[in-house]
Amino acid sequence: MDVQSRGMQGEARSREILLSCKGIVKSYNGPIVLDHVDFSVYRGEVHSLVGENGAGKSTLIKIITGATNRNEGDIIFDGKPIPLEFSRRDAQAAGIACIYQELSLIPGMTVAQNIFLGKEPLMRGVRIIDKKAMNRMAQDLIDRYQFPLKATTIIDDLSIAHRQLAEILKALSDKASLMIMDEPTSSLTRTEVEMLFKIIHMLRDQNISVLYVSHRMEEVYHLSDRVTVLRDGKLVDVLERDRISPAEIIRLMIGHKLEEKAVHHRLVPKNGPVVLEVRNITSLGKFEDISFDLHEGEILGIGGLVGAGRTELVRALYGIDPIDAGTVRYLGKPYVPSVQKAIASGIGFIPEERRRQGILPTQTIRTNIAITNLDVIAPRHVTSRKREQELAMDGIKVCNVKPADPLHLVGNLSGGNQQKVVLAKWLVRNLRLLFIDEPTVGIDIGAKEEIYEHIQRLAASGVSIILVSSDLPELTRLSDRVLVLRKGRIIKEFKDCVLTGEKILRAASGITEEVEDEA
């Protein structure tokens, strides 16, 4: 849909404010996540909320939907003030609904049962669910919105897109006047995305407001009546329809401050021996036809938006998830990835979700460092406490873990020190290759700098590194070369050029023509 046609549709829109947020402040034990943010949604508009990871989008949604409370600020919804203590049930009763990436539908139940869960119609005079009435009510709702669904279909038999429609109907049955959609197209095919867009237009035409959250700039451009841009927990700008363009949104998301800090980097190719050769590998539904070489001592950055396939790629190369097609060679020999083989071959992995996958929070620093080094401390299946203690102290010293107590529980450490422990358990080994996924999420600037130094020191010593990061300054600063993934494919390679975060974000958003001109 072009700008002119969007404009003609928008002229008839009401400018009545449905949701008004003034001076919203939210902090979690110190750090301010939202800093006096103003935000509003008109009745019957599609309003997109955008920003880099950590900009505050999710926190603002949680406050609006009652999942968390604000520290300061005023919210008025549909003419009524929203109190500081505001629950999800309160939000639902007020007419606020949220459709998350992870749908809340119950498997094994029908569409009708999911729509009316907890509010089923009862037979007159008895407390028994009137299934016929429920199915009829659900089908009436389906027909009213012309959704391609049947009330009696089991949820498990529907595609992801059709399940989303059932989720939308669930919200509409509660008479929602504000529909929040959080990355709704992340798991949809192109045809399914087009169907969802038609539904969004239909909702707007019926004066239902849609708050759309997405990293996909072309979707934001095509759908939005207005766009609010957040950066570092602050409101940057609100774009009216005639100012909306992917390039302008990206410029605002990145911010002039980023360029003032000269967050750009001259990529210099590393021409050492090839350590890892990847040819045409595919993991069905995750990524497709990926090929690249990784050289000794090279830091290969992997960029892309949420859902592009970055994490899935490194997990598959490490052997956690299967590879369905293609070949891999490691140190010149054919290699079929597996976790056991990776550890034995000098390959390490620092996962994205530190607390769930990288540490044992109820165990000590010593135990956490030991867990990936059992071949060293227990070569005959009997643990050497002396060797375990030595490795722990080596890791603590190398990574400057604080407190420097091997018996300290890792769950009681700060986020930065937890990440140092994750790194330490690999640094005490003789590594040749290290996969790192989001190395500095949720840690302070001081710990970040230390981790950056460790990564650069590893590369200087000849360790090859594949680095996945959503932090654009981090990616541009550390990488020798960058591959950008989009929808599971490599869409752009940056090498031997001056790289900025804006170039990466443009490529990840599909603005390839402008990227070509600037690269």
Image (spheres, rainbow, N blue to C red):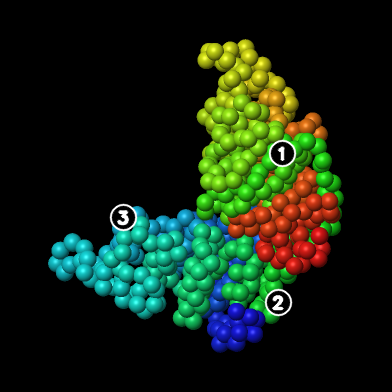
Side (left or right) of 77 relative to 133 = right
Where's residue 448, x and y in %?
A: 73, 41
Q: Do the residues labelled 2 and 1 touch (CB within 8 Å)?
A: no
Where's residue 303, x and y in %?
A: 69, 52
Q: Name the residue located 34 percent from the left edge and 54 percent from the top edge.
A: 107
Mark 2 or mark 1, which is nearer to you?
1
30 to 360, vertically: above or below = below
Pick the front one: 486 or 51? 486
Res. 108 mark? 3
Pick the front one: 372 or 313? 313
* Label 1 sits on residue: 465
Question: Do we see residue 137 in this rendering?
Answer: yes
Pick the front one: 267 or 363? 267
Where's residue 369, x and y in %?
A: 61, 25
Give the quadrant of residue 444. top right
* Label 2 sits on residue: 243
Q: Name the residue located 74 percent from the left edge and 33 percent from the top edge.
A: 463
Q: Name the residue located 72 percent from the left edge and 43 percent from the top edge.
A: 293
User: Element type at marker 3?
Assistant: loop
The kind of residue on which mark 1 rests is Ile
Sequence order check: which comes first, mark 2 or mark 1?
Answer: 2
The kind of residue on which mark 3 rests is Gly
- Where's the C terminus, which quadrant? bottom right
